[in-house]
Structure formats: structure tokens, C-alpha cells
Image: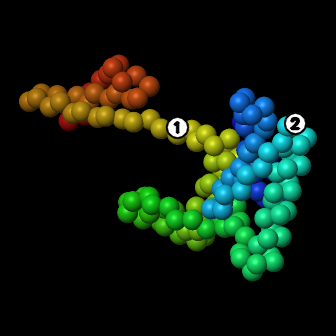
Amino acid sequence: MNNLSYKGYTGTIEASIEDGCLHGQILFITDIITYEGNTVDEIKTSFEEAVDHYLTYCEETGKPANKPYSGTFNVRVGQDLHRKAVEVAFHLGITLNEFVAQSIKNAIEQNGVIRLEHTHHHNITITDNQTSTTAVATTDKPLAWEKFNAIQ
């Protein structure tokens, strides 16, 4: 994906075959700001000029410029996950906000891929009058049951 970056703003680069030019838009803000050029150098310059013009306009008119990110957002995670996150943060001696920020940072540092390493066990106990047997299956071998004789 081809994007431009300048003063914290991100912009797109798209080609218009019909018009024979490049054009783009500043992303992640509510205002709509576009720019265009005929070459890669022109589109870069046009993007930077659009950002500068936008910031100057906002300053002159007293209108607050949309920042690409405020650093604050709401996340709906459900009651159970919320409770568990608060408990983990408490045991780590940090706030919930710090825990969430660290978790997001860790996920990004791992290229956005979170690998869950988890083995899920199913235990089934079969009891007759003489013996008790437990069969165990894991997600690595969900169909390979291992039998263990339990002591009575």
C-alpha cells in the first residue's frame, strides 16, 4: 500500500487512468482534504502543501485542526474480559489503562500477530463397579485418546 506521511498525517496515493494523474486524500481525520500531481514527486509535494495549508487555515480561523489520533478511544470488550483485565492489571500493580496500552504495544511489536499457545484438555471418567478409567484428549491430538487407570 502506498501512503505518504508528513507532520503526523497520513495520505493515500491513487492513480486515475482516465485523467492520467495521481491523487490522494488525508486519512484518519474528519475533514476531507485531497491533493493531486502528475508524478510521484509532485504528489508528495502536493500532499505536504495540503497538510501545511490545512494547518495554516485552522490556525487563522481558530478552528481546531483534526489530529490524526487523539490518544484516547473507547473499546467494548464485554463484562467478563473487562473484569479479567482489571484483575490482571491489579496483580501487575498497574492501572487498567497501562495494562491495555502495554498489551496493544506488545501486539504491535509482534507485527500485530498474537499467537495463543493453549492446550485444551477434555477429561472423561468412566466408572463401573470394578475400575475407574479417565480418557484424555488434547487439541494437538483431538482423536487420540490416552487412557489412564485411576486408583480406587
The residue furthest left is: 129
Q: Which residue is drawn at 58% across and 42% down?
A: 114
The amino acid marked with disc number 1 is: Glu
Residue 115, image quadrant: top right
Q: Give the left or right position of residue 17, taking residue 48 as reference.
A: left
Q: Which residue is drawn at 66% across and 66% down?
A: 71
Q: Split into 4 quadrants, where in the image is the N terminus?
A: top right
Q: Mark 2 points at which residue?
A: 39
Q: Residue at x 35, y 19 (%)?
A: 144
> Residue 89 appears at what percent x and percent y?
55, 66
Q: Give the left or right position of residue 102, taking residue 3 as reference.
A: left
Mark 2: give few (<14), some (14-19) or many (20+) Cα within 10 Å: few
Residue 56, image quadrant: bottom right
The amino acid marked with disc number 2 is: Thr
Q: Can residue 2 be seen in this view?
A: no
> Cα distance, mark 2 to mark 1?
48 Å
Q: Give the left or right position of residue 3, taking residue 77 as reference.
A: right
Q: Give the left or right position of residue 76, taking residue 73 as reference.
A: left
Mark 1: give few (<14), some (14-19) or many (20+) Cα within 10 Å: few
Using the image as rendered, state which of residue 151 and residue 96 is in the foreground: 96
SS class, disc 2: loop
Residue 152, image quadrant: top left
Q: Mark 1 points at which residue?
A: 117
Q: Is residue 16 visible?
A: yes
- Marks 2 and 1 in Cβ contact (< 8 Å): no
Number of numbered callouts drawn: 2
SS class, disc 1: loop
| 2 or 1: tag closer to the N-terminus | 2
> Residue 94 appears at what percent x and percent y?
60, 70
The correct choice, above or below, for 80 with respect to 41 in the image is: below
